[in-house]
Amino acid sequence: MDPDCHYPPLVLALAVCVASASQVYAAEVTQPNAHPIFKIQSLGMPANRIYDIRGFNDAGELSGHTEVVDPDPSLGTSDGRGFLWSHGKLVLLDGDDAHGINSKGEVVGEAYIGSDLHAVIWANGKRIDRGPLGYAYQAEYLDDQDEILGGACDVDDDKLYSFFSTGGDVSKAPRLGTGSVRCYALNSKGTVVYTEVLGVGPKAILQSSILKDGKVMHIGDFAVRGINDNDDIDCVELPNRPAIWRKGVLTQLGTPPRTEVLDMSTINNRGEVVGLILAEKKRRYASLWKDGQCYDLNTCIQPTGKKGRWTLERAAATNNLGQIVGEGIHNGKPTEFLLTPIEAKPVTNR
């Protein structure tokens, strides 16, 4: 797959020059809120691997990409493949890559079958073939009806586009929009949001749309990042302003002065978004947007004592319980963490 085909929304927002259109804005929340506090723990994932966490459900299961770290740094990494982390166990998936996970613990991704790259779903220990993907394709999101949302580069005109497969062979799924689709997301109920670039050069514009119950509605000139089950959408305005679209109203999310948002995850059903912020002196920290406020998650964890020193560098995903997973440094070693709000109920196995 071509890594240059699908740009993260924040990269897109910084790289594409578009004309600004009018939006309806809500006032930022300015009243003081209780500072969120989380219990922190290591996920306990094997330390001989690096992980790119991409999916996180309410059962505490993770999906994404993992690679073995070779003791000889000159040899780099090896054994890159998709993974499922379920109830303390790492499952290496028989595929090239893995992305999203739904509430049933099913994972979507890609696998080579013969010489062709296919969209696949891993469910209950089995790999389900959903058809050939073609050139530089990715199957990234999976809802609870096993519908797949993905994107690709077109081999003929090199345009970026997205598809939504409601069942069967993904190669027969219709494309979304008419322009070059850069960003897209899917909630558990099958509602899709996507951003396309219309036109070229200085006259190019961003146009985001929502696809629900077979109907398309244009919603604004920003880059979408995610959508929750309430149809709230987290997005990025140019040049690099995070915001939430809710029922036709766009609310800008505050960020600390002299910082830059590098990454944002999809929004959960509580209206919370997590990500990664670059501060002064190139310090990177895991962030949380909650109730109109932006928090450095390093200031939100319960004290763990001198033997439990943490530096939280990236918040990769959040679920509907308000739990957060990501990457950080624990006692000097790279470690994947789990944050649980002190008011949240414990996760129980299905």
Image (cartoon, rainbow, N blue to C red):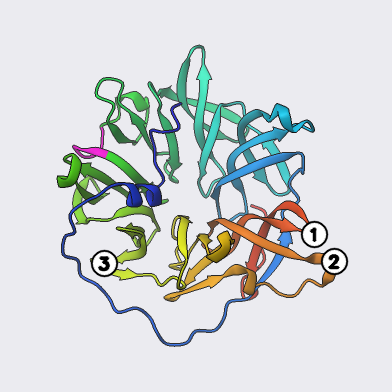
The residue depicted at 23 percent of the width and 66 percent of the height is 248
- Which residue lies under the disc numbered 1? 331
103 over 36 or under it: above or below: above
The answer to whether the residue labelled 3 contacts the one labelled 1, judged by CB atoms less than 8 Å apart, is no
Judged left or right of residue 34, residue 155 is left
Residue 179 within the magenta-colored segment of the rendering: yes
Residue for point 64% across, 66% down: 340
- Which of 209/263 is in front? 263
User: Which percent across, then down, holds residue 2?
Assistant: 43, 28
Of the two numbered discs 3 and 1 in the rendering, the one whose residue sits closer to the viewer: 1
Query: Which callout, 3 or 2, points to the residue nearer the camera?
Result: 2
Image coords of residue 79 (percent x, y)? 67, 27
Q: Are marks 3 and 2 in contact (CB under 8 Å)?
A: no
Residue at mark 3: 247
Between the residue at mark 3 and the residue at mark 2, the CA separation in whole angstroms equals 47 Å
User: From this viewpoint, which residue is outermost toward the right?
Assistant: 307
Q: Is residue 319 left or right of residue 170?
A: right
Of all residues, the one furthest to the bottom in this rendering is 31
Q: Which residues are magenta?
A: 175-180
**Which residue is the site of mark 2?**
307
| Circle 2: element type | helix
Q: Amino acid at mark 2?
A: Lys
- Can the viewer see residue 225? yes
The answer to the question of whether label 2 and label 1 lie on touching residues, with beta carbons closer than 8 A, is yes
Mark drawn on residue 232: none
Does residue 18 sit above or below 176 in this rendering?
below
Amino acid type indicated by mark 1? Asn
Badge 3 crowding class, 10 Å Cα cut-off, few under 14, some 14 to 19, many 20 or more, is few
Q: Earlier in the sequence, mark 3 or mark 1?
A: 3
User: Residue 207 placed where, x, y %?
Assistant: 21, 50
Question: Which of pointers 3 and 2 lies earlier in the amino acid sequence?
Answer: 3
Mark-to-mark CA distance, 3 and 1: 44 Å
